[in-house]
Amino acid sequence: MCANATGGRRTLHAALRTRYQPRALHACHRPHQSAHHSPMTSTISPAPLPAALAARQATRMTPAVIVLAIAFVSFLLISNALGARVCEVTLPWSVGDEPLRLTFSAALISFPFAYLFASVLTEVYGYRISRIVIWSGLAANLVMIGFLWLMTRLPTEAAWAAETGFTDEVQRHWYEAIAHMFLASVSACFVGEFANAATLARMKVAMHGRQASLRLMAGSALAAMLDTVVFVTVAFAYVLDLDAMARMAGLEFVFKCAMQWLVLPLTVGLAQVLKRVDGIDHYDVGTSLNPFRFRASMPRQPVEIR
């Protein structure tokens, strides 16, 4: 069984390496060309993959894709709801005469899980499916913030406001904080998620599908760095001083990497299970990594739900 699996992987790697190699077409093979034309013309002519390998390369929707997409969007929405709160934890150590305090956004405890599901989507189903899901998550956040704005425009019942203290003024301040964090979160998500997906897609092809753990660690580290820098800059540029922002960014980067590397066995295991169950192990050979090429990201064949 091990020999069969190894042979199948080698066949897939060889097919991927040769699929997009330029092929020389001689004039003698093209009788309609004039003798004055160049005797050799280089064109990109993808060679068809074997039927079994082509089936594993198909980009299609499955129930697992839908579940992963729901999980990704859910954790993205949760992160936006938590991001409006800044937490501070005092540790039992001190720096000089001051106690060591850690300042971080509450979204830190949930956002790494969004990267987990996005990474599995890219690893198994490819960049094009992941691109659709990421844009869906950003659109869901836009819908949420729109309805929250609509809520603040509606008048509050006086007795309920007096009992709960959630007056119109409190609601407006709360919405402003949420909207500010929404802008920071969406900006960071756009940069971080697409950087993660693009890194995984290109490294998988370059490394012929090997070293999945290394690829996931590299993608998550790059995404965590970009996500943290963008989020902290946009969210706290006018709230915290530069020193506090640097400490927060450093803490969030380390925590995000630690969280994602801690659940790395779960990420790799889930990807392997889905590859086996759905029969898909997509390689993004020739796929455009432009996040705005949404139309090109749709499957060319009819969507299949199995």
Image: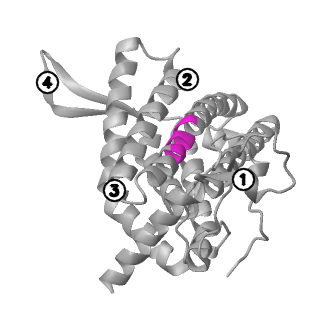
Q: Which residue in the structure is indicated by mark 1?
A: 297
Image position, residue 249 (x, y; %): 38, 27
Q: Foreground mark, 4 or 2? A: 2
Q: Amino acid at mark 2?
A: Val
The percent coordinates of residue 44 (x first, y second) are 67, 50
Local SS, label 2: helix
**Span colored in magenta:** 191-198
Q: Residue at x 29, y 30 (%)?
A: 102
Amino acid on which disc 4 is placed = Ser
Q: Within 10 Å of the Cα at label 3, are there few (<14), some (14-19), or many (20+) other Cα atoms?
A: some
Q: Nearer the viewer, mark 3 or mark 4?
A: 3
Which dot marks residue 213? Answer: 3
Given the image, on which type of amino acid does mark 3 rest? Ser
SS at mark 1 in the image: helix
Which quadrant of the figure contains the C terminus?
bottom right
Q: Nearer the viewer, residue 304 or 176?
A: 304
Secondary element under disc 3, as helix, strand or loop, is helix
Residue 42: x %, y % from top left: 67, 45
Kindly report the distance in space between the C-alpha atoms of the residues bearing marks 2 and 1: 29 Å
Give the spatial CA distance, label 4 vs label 2.
30 Å
How far is the residue under mark 3 from the one under mark 4? 36 Å
Residue 278 seen by the camera: yes
Q: Secondary structure at mark 4?
A: strand
Magenta-highlighted stretch: main secondary structure?
helix
Q: Quick check: 82 above or below 24?
A: above
Is residue 194 rendered magenta in the image?
yes
